[in-house]
Image: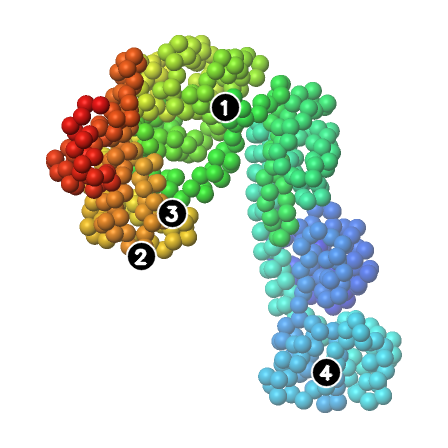
Amino acid sequence: MKRKILGIAPYEELNYSMTIIGEQYPEVETTIYTADLVEGQKLATQLCNDGYDAIISRGGTAKLIRRVVSLPVIDVSLSIYDVHSAIRLAENYTDNFVIVGYPSITEKAHLLCDLLGLNIEIYTIDEDINAHEMLDSLAEKKYELILCDAITNRTALLKSLNTLLITSGLESIKRAYEDALTIIDHVNQVKHKKEILEKGLLCLKQDILFCDDDYKVEFSTLDPIFASEIIKILQTKSEKKELQHYSQVKNCFVTVTVKTYIIDHQKYYCYFINEKNTPPISNKHGITYQKKAEVAAVFSKQLLFSQFIPQEIKLELKKKEASYSSYLVFGESGTAKKNIAYQIYLSQTQDTNYLITINCALITDKLWKFLVNAANGPFVDVHNTIFFDHAEQLKPTSVERLVSLIKTTNVLKNNRLLFTYDNNKTSDSTTFTRLASQLGSAKIYAPAIRERKNELSIITTLLLNKMNIECSKDIMGFDPRALEAFMAYDWPGNFDQLQYCVKELVLNANSHYISEHQVAELLNKERLIQNFTNIQDNFTTKSSLQPPTLFDYTKTIILNVLEQNEGNQTKTAIQLGISRTTLWRYLKEDG
């Protein structure tokens, strides 16, 4: 398709030259008029909507046109060569001449005279200098010839002064054409991309409204009446943030979320409008609703969110994304199962409307009623990811109800399901088997730290960096033997235990390096805590008719520490902070 250029020449000679150059571009449809200043501005206003892609003009006329049209306006500039040609032509006539004009001419004239060592008087006209008075002054000085621009030339002719018009040569006009064609191509590319984006946005099920800070609509997929209603509601709010509203136009509840962005130092807002037949619920009863951007924002601030996930799991998730609608992430306590679940949600391209998180440890009859609600429960909505955290806490009856509900509805067809399952919290594998087999879940195993010993060094280094930032410290690492002891520990609490232990080491370090003694003290304490936890579990399984006494707890701890120290009573007493006599009494007595 031919590109259309409108030419507005301030004087006939330029019109003629522009016509000559225009004929060299057969792929361009050029229309040229002669009109100067306000007359040219008025003509451009009348013709700018006639399908032209750009306007070519000159000097002050181009400047005035640029104020009233949205089309690109290209100025046919004067080159140094144009000024030099005019000077050489004037020298054929007289040596007694002067150059007068606006800065577009005089700046180049000064540069040329400096370069060539020419001694020519140059006078610049601007808004503060009256051209009539200047020309009268020059006439009194008896200059035989005035070299000037078109505006000055018109004034000089009224005073019967001899003038030589400095005009743009063919090369300058050709350069203007080339600039115009380049700009037209760029503008057309932008228009093309804009049209693609607009049509793409219109194809989305998500309604979008783009506004500036004064609520001027830049783009909208909404019905104009509905858009006006939403804008009126937004204008009543002091803060631009998420709001819920019952629409009289749509006769339904809408949720409006906002995203702020800045272009060319100006703030804009993108409003996302979701319609619901029933009012949206708030985050309560152990269930939360989060948009993908909210989840991403939270985890972008967690320095080690992604590093706790093994690379092989990330690759496994990519392979399974298109084939599974349900995922069961399992492993020991503290093995970053929740990180993996969030990674699944953040990396997927479908079912990202909301992440609906249900804490299975908090499920009550009231929450079950909400879950199975056919009006506004999460299972009746679409394109969400429903995340059941701590699925091992579900009672057998709840598991049966949940599996039955999922299998008899379109939940898996319209949404994605995530489950995390803690192996340490239950010895009954029934729940795991039901969720894995009945729902066809992809089983994702979160390995313990003892299975990732080859990664422990780098993870510990990253944790040190994180804790340095959090605690305003400057720890550079471990002493070699301290690191060896730290790496050798099994870390039964996995990443949860590893994180708080590194933090404690950083906080208590007295130098730039963590010492072997510091690590030994910390790990001894961790072993004691682990032993006490195991003891509690053992006592809990015993009959409640004879609950354990404090003596029972203490003696069991002493026996465990004594076993660790290979029967060395002195070392055990020092480690426990008791005397050998007290230790001996506990070992001798039965309580």
Q: Which residue lies under the disc numbered 4?
A: 122
- Tag 2 or tag 1, which sits nearer the N-term? 1
* 573 vs 161, nearest the viewer: 573
Q: Amino acid at mark 1?
A: Ile
- The local crowd at label 4, few if under 14, some if 14 to 19, many if 20 or more residues have their Cα within 10 Å, is some
Please identify, in this view, whether the residue under mark 4 or under mark 2 is nearer the observer.
2
Q: Which residue lies under the disc numbered 1?
A: 287
Q: Amino acid at mark 4?
A: Ile
Location of residue 17 in the rendering, given as x and y in whole percent from the top left corner: 69, 66
Q: CA distance from mark 1 to mark 4?
A: 80 Å
Q: Amino acid at mark 3?
A: Lys
- 7 relative position to 187: left or right: right
- 117 relative position to 31: left or right: left
Label 2: element kind: loop
Going 25% across and 21% down the picture, which residue do you hit? 538
Label 1: element kind: strand
- The local crowd at label 3, few if under 14, some if 14 to 19, many if 20 or more residues have their Cα within 10 Å, is some
Q: CA distance from mark 1 to mark 2?
A: 45 Å
Please identify, in this view, whether the residue under mark 1 or under mark 2 is nearer the observer.
2
Please identify, in this view, whether the residue under mark 3 or under mark 2 is nearer the observer.
2
Residue 476, compared with residue 462, is above or below; it is below
Q: Quadrant of residue 16?
A: bottom right
Q: Which mark is residue 274?
A: none
* 375 vs 193, nearest the viewer: 375
Q: Which residue lies under the disc numbered 2?
A: 511
Q: Which residue lies under the disc numbered 3?
A: 466
Q: CA distance from mark 1 to mark 3?
A: 30 Å
- The local crowd at label 2, few if under 14, some if 14 to 19, many if 20 or more residues have their Cα within 10 Å, is few
* 17 vs 442, nearest the viewer: 442
